[in-house]
Image (tube, rainbow, N blue to C red):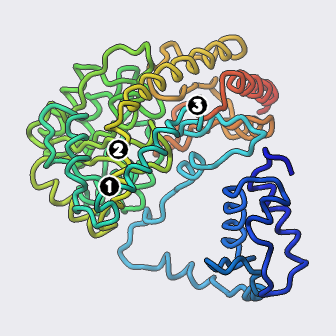
Amino acid sequence: MDKSSGAVDLVAILRSDLDRYSAGEKLPSSRALVDRHRVSPVTVSRAIATLAAEGLVVSRPGAGVYRAAPRRPTPAVGDTSWQEVALSAEPGVPPQRSPDASGVLAALAVAPPEVVDLNSGYLHPSLQPERALAGALTRAGRRPGAWERPPLEGLPELRAWFARDIGGVVATSDVLITAGGQNALTTALRSLVAPGSPVLVESPTYPGVLAVAQAAGLRPVPVPMDADGVRTDLLADAFAATRARVFVCQPVFQNPTGTVLTPARRAEVVDIAHAAGAFVVEDDFSRRLAHADAPALPAPLAADDPNGVVVHIRSLTKTTSPSLRVAALTAHGPAFERLRAVQAVDSFFVPRPLQETALELVGAPSWPHHLRALGAALRDRRQVLAGALNRLLPELLPDRLPYGGYHFWLRLPDGRDVRALTSAALHAGVAVTPGPAYFTAEPPAPYVRVGYAYAEGPERLIEGVERLYRAYVATESRP
C-alpha cells in the first residue's frame, strides 16, 4: 500500500485479515501495521478505531488490539403492529400531531456521488471554513472549564456577540443560545402558541416550519407572498379571521422565493402583529449568505422593536457547517422567560464545547474573511447557474434573481407534473426539490427549487442543469 492510501483502504484489508485470528487472539502491533502497509500511525489508529466501533476488535491500552468475540445472533423481529393503535387513539390529540416530515427529510437527504446535488440547503465542504473550524475546536478544548456545565441561557460572551450581530435594541439579556435554527423554531412555536391554535406562515414557506407546527399540534395558515414579500393586506385579514397569536416569516432572502421584505412592508408587519396582540417570529437564517454584489440589507425586524413583538432567530449553521448547530433566540419581556423554560425542559442547555467553539470561530480574524469569501463564491455560483438556465431553460429563469441565499425558485408551465419532473431528474443524475412541500395546501402553480451551494463547483452546476434539461424535455409531452 502506498503512502496515499487512507484509513478506508486499510480497514478493508484488516477486516478481511481478521479471519486468520481466533477470538481473543492478539493482532499485529501498530508499528508492525505501519511497516507492513506503508501508512502513517494516524491512519492505523483511525482504522483500528473503525474496526472497534464495528465490534470486530477490542483495543486494550498498553496491551494491544485483539479479535473480538463473535457477535450474538440478531434477535427475532417482534410484532409492533399494536403501536398503530397506541399512537393514533389518544383522546383529544389533534390529528396534526404526526407531522409531514417529507420536506425536511428530502432536504436532509444526501445524494449519491454520481448525482449532482441541487437539492441540499448546506454548503459544500469546499465552501465551509474547515480550517477555521478545526482551529476553533482545538482552542475551545483548551479553554478553562470547557467541559463544565454552561449557564442555561448560554455563555455570556456568545450571547453578547449575537446581540451585537443583531444590533439595535437587542441586549445580551435578550439572547438565548439554542442548538441550531430548527431547535429555535421548535422552542418558539411551542412556547408562544397553544396546541390546536392557528399559526400564520408565509406561502410558500420553509417545510421545516410546517413540520414543527404540525408536531406541536398547531394549524399552519398560509399568507400569500408576492415579489416584495408577504402581502400585508392579507396578513391583517388573516390575523382578524383566525385570531392567531404568531406569524412566522423570513424577511431576508426568504426560503424558497428568495425575496427581501420591502421597507414599507417591514414596518407594516410589526404594526399589524402588534395591533393583533401577536408575535412575529423572524427567522433570519440567510442574512450572512448575502452575495458579494448584494445591496445593503435592512436591519433585522428585532433591531427596531422595543415592544417585544419580534422573536428573532439567528443561526451560525448555514454559513459554517451542518454540524455547528448553534443559534440565538431573542425576545424581550415575559416571552423570554417562557422561551427559556421550554428550552430548559426540552434539552437543558447547548453543550458547552460547542458554544466555546462557536465563540472561538466568530472571534477569530478569519471569520470576516470567510464571510467575504463565501459571499463572492455564492455570487459566482448564482451567475453560473443563471447562465446555464438561460441557455437551456430560459422560460424557467425568474425575472428577478435573489442577491443572497443559495437557490432559485423556478415556476414551471401550468400543467407540468412536478413529481414526474423531479423523479426524471433524479433518474438523469440531478437532485432538485419539488415545490409542493413548501405549501400548506395545494400549490397555486408548479414549482421546483434549484440550489447551488452543495454542488462541487461551477462545472457540476452546469452539468446539473444539462441533466435537468434532459429530464424536462423527456417529461414535456407527458399528460
Q: How many tags in the picture?
A: 3
Question: 270 or 360: nearer the eye?
Answer: 360
Reading the chain from its start, which is encountered first: label 3 or label 1? 1
Amino acid found under the numbered disc labelled 3? Gly
Q: Secondary structure at mark 2?
A: helix
Q: Which residue is mark 2?
A: 360
Name the mark on residue 143: 1
Reading the chain from its start, which is encountered first: label 2 or label 1? 1
Q: Secondary structure at mark 1?
A: loop
Identity of the residue drawn at 30% across and 55% down: 189
Quarter of the rendering containing residue 239: top left
Name the mark on residue 451: 3
Say whether residue 271 is left or right of residue 195: left
Reading the chain from its start, which is encountered first: label 3 or label 2? 2
- Residue 402 in the image: state x and y as whole percent: 46, 20
Distance Cα–Cα, label 2 vs label 1: 10 Å
- Residue 331 in the image: state x and y as whole percent: 18, 47
